[in-house]
Amino acid sequence: MFENLTERLERSFKLLRGEGKITEINVAETLKDVRRALLDADVSYKVAKNFCDSVKEEALGQDVLKSVRPGQLMTKIVHDRLVDLMGGEAAGINTKGTPGIVLVAGLQGSGKTTFSAKLAFFLKKKKGMRPLLVAADVYRPAAMEQLRVLGQQTGVDVYTEEDNKNPVQIAEHAIKKAREEGYSPVIIDTAGRMAIDQAMMEEIGTIKKKVNPTETLFVVDSMTGQDAVETARVFHEKLQFDGVVLTKLDGDTRGGAALSIRAVVNKPIKFVGTGEKMDALDIFHPARIADRILGMGDIVTLVERAQEQFDEEESKKLRKKLAQDNFNFDDFLKQINQVKKMGNIKDLAAMIPGISKAVKDADIDNDAFKEIEAIIGSMTQYERENPSVLNGSRRKRIAAGSGTSITEVNRLIKQFDESRKMMKNLKGAGGAAMMQSLKKGGMGI
């Protein structure tokens, strides 16, 4: 996401490189290019203009220190204003109540049902809650079945009434069940339409009035750009929702919705969907998004994802194996699976400062590990546990069995040996050592 905007802004800041000071002329030239970059990213003209005006006002009031170049100062100012534009701080979700009630609204196809399940999984896994999903979409074929399947995947109970076509009654009955059986929060997945219509708005308005939710969230497909912003405005006039959820932010989105929506409806973006898996849901952090837009990476989110996959017991076993020089291909495969669980490989690489530009056009996909897994899968259990026995004839057999070449098998074995040496040098601390060093370095995690 944001790749084109990042590239355009980098070009804009080049106009100030080599300049001795900030002047009204060179600021105007830079911001003219910044405004074009924002418009190309599908940010509304009014938002882009107001943004550039605020940057200009701050930039012309700044004295450039000898240790700071004009381009660096402009980058900082733009970063700060981007953070402000997107809401400043990450916004929480209100799940208080007996039970707490979260009403999910949006157009059909925006990803409401999937988000509802992701949110339930997020609250269960990270907050220790016992959510109840409610299938209140009585119009879309298979909507209830979709939510039921997602509930099974996430281990979250789903409330349905197959023959009831009254979404208000379904929601009220679900809330009663939650109150009696100790569920909280109740997450109500409502019906959407292909476009905004009066009947749809009346129905969602009635549901909100009857169930009195503690949190109303509007879900919008970020790939629809300015259409998403306009839809959010219309929904907010009717619903007065508490926050926005942007789905499909991992897709081919230019970022305009993320940059514009807060300014238009004055409500925070609370969550972003970053993939199809149930754990691909992130809290929206404006500062981190600004970092990514300006090519600074997002190391904090990267480390948080690593922490989520970090297993203390597995780490102890790994340290013991490394100390005894018993690290093998089964352990290597476990490390690969942990990386895969962290999310899209290209997105992860882009979170590392200085790497985002390098991987922009790189052909990296989530199947990058398939060849490695095939090679290891073609080894016998004895070979995986005893890598030193992999002689020429064994390697030839493994290459044939995995559909690869001996060169590729040799390359993997070399990578394995290098990984084992590196991890041994870290004294088996692995991810834990990285976490501790980042904490000491003031990353605030």
Image (cartoon, helix red, strand yellow):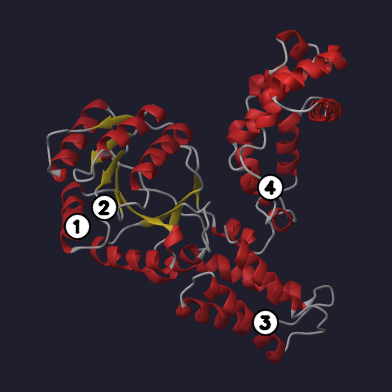
Quarter of the image with the N terminus is: bottom right
Mark toward the start of the polypeptide (2 vs 1): 2
Query: Which residue lies under the disc numbered 2?
Result: 192
* Disc number lying in front (3 or 2): 2
Q: Is residue 254 left or right of residue 104?
A: right
The mark that comes first in sequence, 1 or 4, is 1
Q: Residue 30 got which mark?
A: 3
Residue corresponding to mark 1: 200
Which amino acid is tagged 3? Thr
Query: Mark 4: which secondary structure?
Result: helix
The mark that comes first in sequence, 3 or 2, is: 3
Q: Decide: few, some or many residues near mark 3? Use Cα within 10 Å; few <14, some 14-19, many ≥20.
A: many
Q: Residue at x 67, y 51 (%)?
A: 350
- Where is residue 390 drawn, in percent x and y? 84, 15
Q: Secondary structure at mark 2?
A: loop
**Amino acid identity at mark 4:** Ala
Q: Which residue is mark 4?
A: 349
Question: In front: 119, or 84?
Answer: 119
Distance in Å between CA atoms under marks 3 and 2: 42 Å
Taking the spot 65% from the left edge, 34% from the top edge, the residue there is 339
